[in-house]
């Protein structure tokens, strides 16, 4: 399933794609990879955009000519789709205002520290202004898709109820346990913590002071965990616990784990009110996916599109 945003992100790789040129004249016509009416993408531009993807492929596995070729072809198709949708934006006279762009930048910054935000540009070897231009293009693709397709994906209350009746078991996980967790890096620290627990020290306080797990600041509280959510080596000793009991020490590559069960419960049929937004999004994504292909095909038929796969 693909929501509007997922489709758009798939079409416009946020950090990698900058503007395709609107050029009526070029000194190397045989180096044009894609043409959508008057908008073109040159081989030089394609290679520039693809280089970070190539580096990512090489990080995961040794460079392979066939693998790189396949990746280039997939990326080419994404670029073609993007150029087609942006051509439609021209027809609809759609644009992204300065206010819309600034709001999107602020939303993105919320998820990053100042240092992390700056590192993003260093890592991608891109200036902030170039990044904003790429973000603007992604937003425009999303706006076109919303305008053209969202009218196809409205959902009625009866459809929500029917979907719930059919799928509610997918959201029921059986037994759940709420637990606290202490993660320690060494055996000596484990011995010390175990002794203090045996002496009656509070598990949550020890977790807050000594655990290196992400939930340490919450007293080790992991919230509710469902079966299948944790690796088997951690799940069994955890679910064997009764409320209030402390687990044996479990060693993993991350360190030494100790759990304390807080509460167990069996989950029954979830209330429909808790699932409405999830259901609505599920139906919309299914319909959006179904509508997207035919919509894009119609756009392809109305524009002059030339693709030269051989030169990439």
Image (cartoon, rainbow, N blue to C red):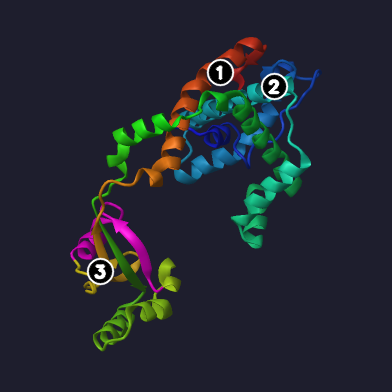
The magenta region covers 219-240
Residue found at x 25% / y 49% = 268
Q: Nearer the viewer, mark 3 or mark 1?
A: 1
Q: Which residue is mark 1?
A: 295
* Residue 127 visible, this orientation: no
> Distance between the Cα atoms at labels 1 and 2?
14 Å
Task: Please state, as top left, top right, bottom left or bottom right, where the C terminus lies in the image.
Answer: top right
Mark 2 closeness class: few <14, some 14–19, many ≥20 residues within 10 Å: many
Q: Which residue is mark 2?
A: 87
- Splitting the image into 4 quarters, where does residue 194 fall? bottom left
* Residue 30 visible, this orientation: yes
| Residue 24 is inside the magenta segment | no
Mark closest to the chain's N terminus, 3 or 2: 2
Element under disc 1: helix
Is 255 above or below relative to 171? below
Could you say where residue 125 lies in the image, as x and y percent from the top left? 68, 48
Residue found at x 56% / y 29% = 75
Could you say where residue 182 lies in the image, as x and y percent from the top left? 34, 73
Mark closest to the chain's N terminus, 3 or 1: 3
Task: Please state, as top left, top right, bottom left or bottom right, where the N terminus lies in the image.
Answer: top left
Could you say where residue 59 lies in the image, as x and y percent from the top left? 49, 46
Mark drawn on residue 250:
3
Q: Are marks 3 and 1 in contact (CB under 8 Å)?
A: no
């Amino acid at each position: 399933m693909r929501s509007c945003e997922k489709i758009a992100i798939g079409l416009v790789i946020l950090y990698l794609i900058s503007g395709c040129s609107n050029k009526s004249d070029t000194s190397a016509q045989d180096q044009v990879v894609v043409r959508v009416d008057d908008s073109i993408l040159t081989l030089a531009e394609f290679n520039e955009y693809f280089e970070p993807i190539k580096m990512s492929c090489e990080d995961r596995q040794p460079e392979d000519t066939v693998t790189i070729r396949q990746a280039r072809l997939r990326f080419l198709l994404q670029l073609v789709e993007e150029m087609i949708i942006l051509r439609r934006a021209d027809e609809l006279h759609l644009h992204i205002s300065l206010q819309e762009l600034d709001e999107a930048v602020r939303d993105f910054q919320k998820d990053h520290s100042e240092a992390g935000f700056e590192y993003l540009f260093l890592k991608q070897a891109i200036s902030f202004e170039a990044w904003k231009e790429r973000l603007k293009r992604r937003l425009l693709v999303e706006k076109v898709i919303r305008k053209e397709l969202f009218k196809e994906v409205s959902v009625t209350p009866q459809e929500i109820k029917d979907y719930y009746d059919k799928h509610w078991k997918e959201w029921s996980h059986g037994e759940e346990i709420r637990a606290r967790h202490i993660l320690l890096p060494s055996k000596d620290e484990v011995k010390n913590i175990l002794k203090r627990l045996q002496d009656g020290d509070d598990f949550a306080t020890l977790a807050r002071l000594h655990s290196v797990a992400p939930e340490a600041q919450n007293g080790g509280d992991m919230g509710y965990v469902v079966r299948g959510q944790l690796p088997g080596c951690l799940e069994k000793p955890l679910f064997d616990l009764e409320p209030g009991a402390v687990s044996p020490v479990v060693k993993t590559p991350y360190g030494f784990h100790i759990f304390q069960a807080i509460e167990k419960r069996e989950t029954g049929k979830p209330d429909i009110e808790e699932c409405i937004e999830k259901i609505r999004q599920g139906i919309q994504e299914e319909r959006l996916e179904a509508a997207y292909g035919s919509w894009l095909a119609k756009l392809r038929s109305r524009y002059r599109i030339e693709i030269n796969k051989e030169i990439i």
